[in-house]
Amino acid sequence: MPITAEFEYVKPTGLEEALQVLSLYREKARALAGGTDLIVHLKEGLARPEVVVDVKGLTELGGLAMKDGRLRVGALVTFSDLIASAQVKSKFPLLWEASLTVASTGVRNRATLAGNICSAVPSADSAPALAVYGAEVLVRGLRGERRVPFSEWFAGPKRTVLAPDELVTAVELPLPEKKHGACYMKLSRYEGEDLAQAGVGVLAFSDNTYRVAVCALGPVPVRCAATEAALGGARLSEKVLAKAKETILKEISPIGDIRSSKEYRLHMTQVMLGRALETAVARLFGKGPKYGTGNIA
């Protein structure tokens, strides 16, 4: 399908120039990085900007590195970059595993982590990992830079707190102080390129504490504080798991759509939570399936 919309194309040579264009056009401008969503929206007429600002060449938006106990993921870092990183795999295994489930290899070669959260679809596979790792989104405008806690990033389905004249420059994740095991469990209709019908991300720590977050189970991805509290610092048992499974139903609000019924999502969330918790604990102690395997429900 060709792009029939007319718009100006700008390829700035620096971040300041890009911000000036965004400030001038505001809601009528769209930034282009990976383009895996924007190009589709242009073809389908869902996006009709007056100007497209190509930021792919801005060195200020690149880089993937650990510094002072924080992983900095530049806005141009793709999911394939994350998968190729030994540091991400060893230190942030939940983000690494979730990255493997995003679309297809071709899409992952282009799609960026920053773009994924800017699209703000409820089924964003990266969101549970960013939520449980306590990520921050670094945002820059002509007025300066600000840090947005990931818990405050989503304003609703396909909406964020990013202003029209701002750009995401990076996402930062603090390294957990304690060793952890992790599991991202994704419910799909088939193996391959598909949006999540439901997604559950879990971190398990050696002191029997847990972090849990979900996607595709409400208007926005969320961290499940009540479910974490229900696990109560106890070792996993049938009783503990049953309590957690009942609790998580109070923290999600799935809909029924073409991909799944509400009832199926509710049932499978409980199944996936149990599997993800057990897998994360097993991995914590060097057991269970290898990361990147056995996580499609």
Image: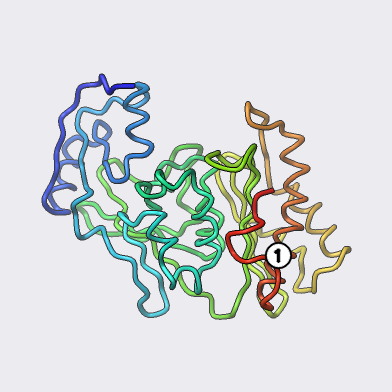
Q: Quadrant of residue 259?
A: top right
User: In the picture shown, does residue 43 fall above or below 79?
Assistant: above
Residue at x-position 37% and y-position 30% = 40
How many marks on residues?
1
**Mark 1, residue position:** 279
Residue 160 relative to residue 132: left or right: left
x, y percent for residue 38: 34, 35
Q: Residue at x 83, y 65 (%)?
A: 240
Seen from the viewer's position, the closer of residues 83 and 220 is 83
The local secondary structure at tag 1 comes to: helix
Residue 124 lies, in percent from the top left, at: 51, 46
Q: Quadrant of residue 98?
A: bottom right
> Which amino acid type is marked by label 1?
Thr
Residue shown at 48% from the left, 53% from the top:
152
Where 273 falls versus 85 (above or below)?
above
Residue found farthest to the right: 239
Q: Position of residue 227 (x, y in %)?
A: 72, 59
Above/below status of 182 relative to 78:
below
Q: Would you call the spot at circle 1 few (<14 residues within 10 Å), some (14-19), or many (20 or more)? A: many
The answer to whether residue 257 is left or right of residue 68 is right
The quadrant the N terminus occupies is top left
Query: Looking at the picture, does residue 45 appear above or below residue 202?
Result: above
User: How are the colours assigned in the image?
Assistant: rainbow
Q: Pinpoint residue 296: horizontal percent, then vertical percent.
A: 65, 50
> Foreground residue, 209 or 108?
108
Q: Residue furthest top?
A: 4
